[in-house]
Image (cartoon, rainbow, N blue to C red):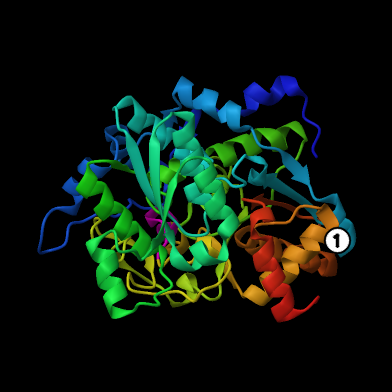
Amino acid sequence: MVDIPKRYLDEILPSYWYNIIPDLPKPLPPPMDPENGSSRIELLQKIVPSEILKQQFTVERYVKIPEDVLEKYRIVGRPTPLYRAIGLERYLDTSAKIYFKYEGALPTGSHKINTAIPQVYYAYIEGIERIVTETGAGQWGSAVALATSLYRILSTVFMVRVSYEHKPSRRALMEFYGAEVIPSPSKLTNFGREILSRDPENPGSLGIAISEAIEYTLSHRYRYAIGSVLDVVLLHQSVIGLESIKQMEIVGEEPDVVVACVGGGSNFGGLAYPYIGLRNNGKRFIAVASAEVPKFSKGVYTYDYPDTAGILPLIKMITLGKDFIPPPIYSGGLRYHGLAPSLSLLAREGVIEYAEISERDVYRAARIFAETQGIVPAPESAHAAKVVIDIALEAKKRNEKPVILFNMSGHGLLDIENYRSMMIRYGKE
């Protein structure tokens, strides 16, 4: 671990979130309503807290973090540690320096709590009694379950069916925090029943789960928590990058390459956006997606719905289409059809690079990282680890000495049965 004295901890934890919108190379295309039907933009006012809606559309570069949220950040363990991956460097025999921000140190094992806390806080001060959301792999649902328990309000989580079945430990963790967990598609909503009538064995998708969560929110007058994609989520996640900037300064380093995996974009944006907007001096930024969900190579930059039912406003993003049903891969957090509008724009403008990694290669990278660093990465985070390994090996060939920073967005201890299945499938490669 990078040795940072305790007196620095409060200095490292930022008092403001960073908003990349005013620093984008082009104006962000606004959300739109469809040509026919009711206003989806007005719908947002009914399902999310008013302050969240305000932050979604703000053009201010910095947004102050409420004191109560800062207190909860400290309670759950922020700032998170920055590590140098000495064991991995030695194994690769590379001239590169590898650092990682370890969000897996947080209680639910991932970065998702960074936005769950403020979203639940703003609902709490409005007197809301229940939060409804969706989850893919379970990290987001676990974060919402914990955040609602901290504020003593209720939560319901629609969990993508394939993850509900493959990740019983994640489901149990949510229930332990007091959440009600529903497999999606479900019979609780009209949309879920419609999906099941067409395909009783449907494995589910994040788009379907989002649609169910929103329908359920509307029918009960609860509030909906947004897991990714919308830029307010990336705003809250900026604590990752803001902390890492200060931590890297303390140890006298500046990254040349910044890497993170991508589902909807909050993990990547959380680490990379403060560097892109505030510290971009020729750095490389690499977003790593699943080869089984090839949104960068096969997606289209167009207006599309964030959810499968088309309840939310249309947003301009790189998308595989709202009806895309991804294969039942183990990286449930990467099974989303679209990409955050701001991240889509940055990709289109060439500010970021991308890679798409197969599950077999992810498994190999996860084993290497676990065997050299001791940390079992979440399958999603192992996508980033694979690219970091490739960059470090290339640096060795070129006799270059880049400083690489990546986001270890979560640990994989609750995914160990899935890794066991991969071990059976791929062997001890």
Residue 317 seen in this snapshot: no
Is residue 20 located in the magenta-colored stretch of the structure?
no
Q: Position of residue 165 (x, y in %)?
A: 52, 66
Q: Position of residue 371 (x, y in %)?
A: 83, 60
The amino acid type found where label 1 is placed reads Thr
Q: Secondary structure at mark 1?
A: loop
Q: Is residue 166 above or below residue 142?
A: below
Is residue 343 located in the magenta-colored stretch of the structure?
yes
- In this view, the residue in front, 111 or 27, is 111
The quarter of the image holding the N terminus is top right
Within 10 angstroms of label 1, few (less than 14), some, or many (20 or more) residues?
Answer: many
Residue 425 figure quarter? bottom right
- In this view, the residue in front, 74 or 390, is 74
Q: Is residue 414 above or below residue 116?
A: below
Q: Residue at x 71, y 69 (%)?
A: 420
Please give left or right for residue 249 compared with residue 268 in the image.
Answer: right
Please give left or right for residue 37 compared with residue 218 in the image.
Answer: left
> Which residue does the numbered mark 1 point to in the structure image?
94
Q: Where are the magenta residues, as a range?
A: 338-345
